[in-house]
Amino acid sequence: MRYLLIIALALFATSCHDWKNIEKDLQTRFILAEDNTVIEIPEGYYKFTGSLSLEGKNNVTIKGAGIDKTFLSFKGQTEGAEGIRANNCTNITIEGLTIWDAKGDAIKTQDVNGLVFRNVRTEWTRGPHETNGSYGFYPVNCDNVLIEGCEAIGASDAGIYVGQSRHVIVRNNLAYQNVAGIEIENTLYADVYENEAVDNTGGILVFDMPGLVQTNGGFVRVYNNNIHHNNHRNFAPEGNIVAEVPPGTGVLVLATNHVEIFDNQIFYNRTLATGIVCFKTVKDEIQDTLFNPYPSAIQIYNNEYKRGFGLPSMQNDMGKLIFWKSALNVPSIVYDGYVDPSLAVNGKLPADRAICIHGNKNASFVMVDAVNGFKNLSRDEIPFKCELDKLPAVNFAKRINE
């Protein structure tokens, strides 16, 4: 029904708008926007052949008439890689609109301090496809980021991605039919809560990757989320790190430190409901000498798990490993067993940097012993029954209007 209404709106708008004049007018308004202004985009369906860009702006709001009222289509885009791009700005808000079919990323922001995405949808309307843009929402090297009430659909990497940023809140969003629903990468101080991630390859990912300016992230809390039925085939282009995520992944922590996963519903993710993985399990050689590939200070507690019937995915090596080692007895929580040698005391992580798992409902566990070629699997959860000090809530260094 929603698409019938949208088609009717598009047909009506076709007779009412001169595409080229509207595109030129809006691009001019972006370029010439003065500080402390609102760029309003009325209800309607608008087509663009080039990106809309903000550069060096302060206190600017881009405001549509509503997520189901203002549609910006980039299906015929020939210039630029993004739908909307903002660089070197402070206090930018984008709200109340839908972006369709960007050639690359739907919205990319870089070096922005004070960023709000509110009630925005990003979507590739043909459905999941490897040539879709990589990211729906893509803030990089940003501070004080709030993403709320948004929808992300069809990204070939991550629907909602936050990279190399600081002080981040991602809440009350819906991510579906992406490779990764929500991804927090090399980011410090992030709260991810009250989101729904469904029908992605992986629901919520917390990653650190080598070769980036902000070398390591951490202090991330993932809580009160509904992470379910993330069993979609992986349609990431070959060579992307998310191409390694097995279909059926609920939550995956890769290489990062100081992470809490708690009070989530993690239901019907058939391969890897929750994983804690060292980067060495994914790739043996790491060129970045400053990068720490080992996860530590990870606490997984008070989550509820359900799995249902079905085999783990056989699409990639991780899924095949879980199938070979577990068959139908697929564990809820998988730890690869790597221990950071710079922290280890008698082969174990110290108490304040341990992997701690407790209080989860309907949860099973396995340590797969990746460091020894997966020879000595253990389902003994007792060595991991511990508790860490709770991480603090995210505080914005510069207050965002909530």
Image (cartoon, rainbow, N blue to C red):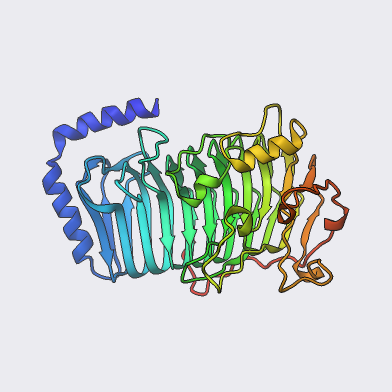
Q: Residue at x 67, y 68 (%)?
A: 392
Q: Residue at x 56, y 74 (%)?
A: 290
Q: Is residue 278 left or right of residue 187?
A: right
Residue 80 lies, in percent from the top left, at: 24, 54
In the image shown, does 341 or 221 lie closer to the viewer?
341
In the image shown, does 203 or 58 lie closer to the viewer?
203
Instruction: Look at the image and tell me in which quarter the N terminus lies.
Output: top left
Outermost residue, right side: 382
Q: Residue at x 21, y 30 (%)?
A: 12
Location of residue 131 by image quarter: top left
Residue 386 lies, in percent from the top left, at: 84, 60
Q: Is residue 173 visible?
A: no
Q: Is residue 127 above or below residue 113?
A: above
Location of residue 8 by image quarter: top left
In the image shown, does 42 or 212 lie closer to the viewer?
212
Residue 279 lies, in percent from the top left, at: 61, 58
Q: Is residue 145 left or right of residue 38?
A: right
Q: Is residue 260 above or below residue 112?
A: above
